[in-house]
Image (tube, helix red, strand yellow):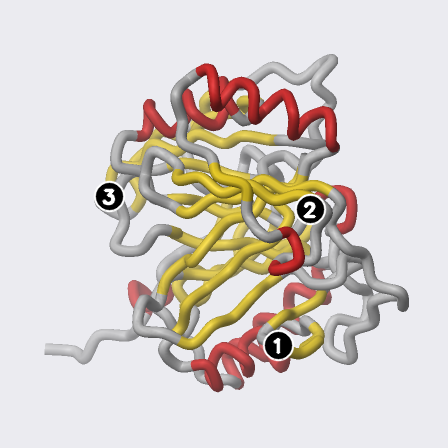
Amino acid sequence: MQLGQLGFEVADLAAWRGLLGEVLGLQDVGEGRWRMDDHAWRIDLREGPADDLAFVSWELEPDELDAALARLEAAGVAVAAADPAERGVARRYTLTDPAGIPTELTTGNLRAAEPFSSPVVRGGFVADALGLGHLVLSTRDKDESVRFYAELLGARLSDHIVTTYFGHDVDISFFHVNRRHHSVAFGGPQKHRINHFMLEVRSVDEVGLALDRTLRAGLRLNQTLGRHPNDGMISFYARTPSGFQFEVGTGGREVDDATWAPTTYGAISTWGHHPPQLFVPRPKA
């Protein structure tokens, strides 16, 4: 199981194309689809007023899919079979998670015939079997979402972060579905369905180059370069044209379920990840 595909409905399609292609280094494969690894595509862009996450698609092995469908049916969750050709998959089912987020379960996702190569991210992305990356979702009821993803979809707890971040209370739970430290995390209610999505590159230099491209593109930097204590990721955060965030990072920790013991951290970052506006010099009185 992995984070397979993300869909976004965006008001400024041109700005998003610039973000995904020129800043983040994904490949435009046509029809609003963007590629970053061996999968035929990972991100779907559609023009519309929502400026939000349109769907999250989880890719499963066939037997995992059947087991998940059985658990969902037993729990009384409404699940519908959907056209697999629309996503380029063998089987596809749609449902809505407890926060109201359109969610899809698929298997047999189409792979590309040619190796992926980005003219911007020369080393490529850490994706493929680990999935697209990760995302942090808004929740109406965090405990309800945690139970849904853990008990019905089979996600496994990595850890928690409970702290105060520049005056804001933070309580986030992180879940993995493969070796990636987390593919999904849950916080409190947000303005958008999503707080951020993360793409992982292969070196600190690639993170720095992405930061340079972000600044040159005039995108708002939300958090400076820093390292998280739980997944060890060195990353920065910036604002998408739709208002939620993207993260570019490297060095993410991998989980071995045989030895992993979830814990709770008291800080979001070991160092860095500061809101840059806090450091703008103030005029002297």
What residue is pinned by disc 2?
A: 131
Mark 2 or 1: in front is: 1
Q: How many marks?
A: 3
Q: Does residue 163 appear anywhere in the picture?
A: yes
Q: Position of residue 11 (x, y in %)?
A: 36, 77
Whole-percent x, y for residue 15 in the image: 46, 83
In this picture, residue 251 sits left or right of residue 6: right
From the viewer's perspective, is residue 138 above or below residue 13?
above
The residue indicated by pointer 3 is: 168
Residue 185 vs residue 140, the one in the foreground = 140
Q: CA distance from mark 3 to mark 2?
A: 30 Å
Mark 3 or mark 2, whichever is nearer to me: 2
Going from the N terminus, do you reach mark 3 or mark 2 first? 2
On screen, 269 above or below 74? Answer: below
Q: The residue under label 1 is which amino acid type?
A: Glu
Q: Residue furthest right?
A: 114
Q: Where is residue 146 drawn, in percent x and y?
A: 41, 25
Q: CA distance from mark 2 to mark 1?
A: 21 Å
Q: Secondary structure at mark 2?
A: loop
Front one among 219 and 117: 117
Considering the numbered disc 1 on the image, is that residue within a helix, a strand or a loop? loop
Residue shown at 44%/78% (left/top)? 219
On the image, numbered disc 1 is attached to which residue? 31
